[in-house]
Amino acid sequence: MNKNTRGSLIWLRLVRFTHQSNLLSNEFLKQFDLTTAQFDVLMQISTYEPLTQCDLADKVTVTQGGISRMLARLEKEGLVERKQEWKTKTISLTSKGREKLNNAFDAQLAFQSSFFDESLTEEEQKTLYSLISRVQKNSEEKMSKR
């Protein structure tokens, strides 16, 4: 049964790192009353607003059903607003949502960067970024062929 390929071992490491990073980020973001998924959703809305719920779901790692529940919660907290123009419903940040994201942004960026800054040289980080970018581009090409 132990017939792992180098590719499968790399994939397993990436999955484990992502899981551990998300657990640690959830703990870190508690001080801002956010989860990693909520931070990601607020970031995507901030970057692409106004956007539809379907477009948002394509950009984050939350399911369609999960996005609906999360948006309802974020809207109830006054962080996002949904508007309907004819048949199109769009989502935008409120000023309260923008403020919450701004408060957490620099700290979360520093926290995530610390994983790499503490274990890799600047040159190693550049190499890793380049390699991961190539792998991601390949996966995007595979997705577009589906």
Image (cartoon, grey):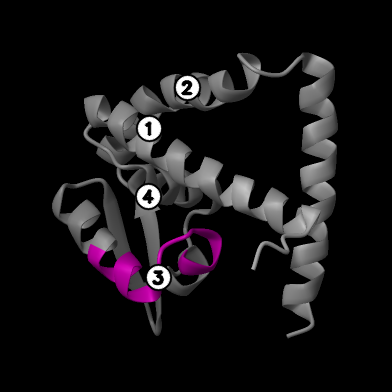
Relative to 71, 24 lies left or right = right
Q: Counting residues from the N terminus, which is met first, the one under dot 1 or under dot 4? A: 1
Q: Counting residues from the N terminus, which is met first, the one under dot 4 or under dot 2? A: 4
Q: Position of residue 71 (x, y in %)?
A: 28, 61
Q: Counting residues from the N terminus, which is met first, the one under dot 3 or under dot 1? A: 1
Residue 40 belongs to magenta span: no
User: Dot 1 corresponds to which residue?
Assistant: 24
Q: Position of residue 128 (x, y in %)?
A: 79, 34
- Asked whether the residues under the numbered discs 1 and 4 touch, taking CB atoms below 8 Å apart as contact, a structural biologist would say no
Circle 4 Cα neighbour tier, 10 Å, few/some/many (<14 / 14–19 / ≥20): some
Residue depicted at x 19% and y 57%? 73
Examine the residues drawn in magenta and state their main secondary structure: helix
Element at badge 2?
helix
Q: Position of residue 7 (x, y in %)?
A: 77, 56
Residue 63 belongs to magenta span: yes
User: Dot 4 corresponds to which residue?
Assistant: 37
Q: Amino acid at mark 4?
A: Ala
The quarter holding residue 36 reads top left
Q: Which mark is residue 111?
A: 2
Relative to 73, 28 lies left or right = right
Residue depicted at x 31% and y 68%? 66
Q: Which is nearer the eye, 3 or 35?
A: 3
Q: Amino acid at mark 1?
A: Leu
User: Dot 3 corresponds to which residue?
Assistant: 63
Q: Amino acid at mark 3?
A: Thr
Element at badge 4?
helix
Gap between marks 1 and 4 measured at Cα: 13 Å
- Asked whether the residues under the numbered discs 2 and 1 touch, taking CB atoms below 8 Å apart as contact, a structural biologist would say yes
Q: Counting residues from the N terminus, which is met first, the one under dot 4 or under dot 3? A: 4
Residue stretch rendered in magenta on the structure: 57-69
Q: Position of residue 95 (x, y in %)?
A: 30, 37
Element at badge 1?
helix
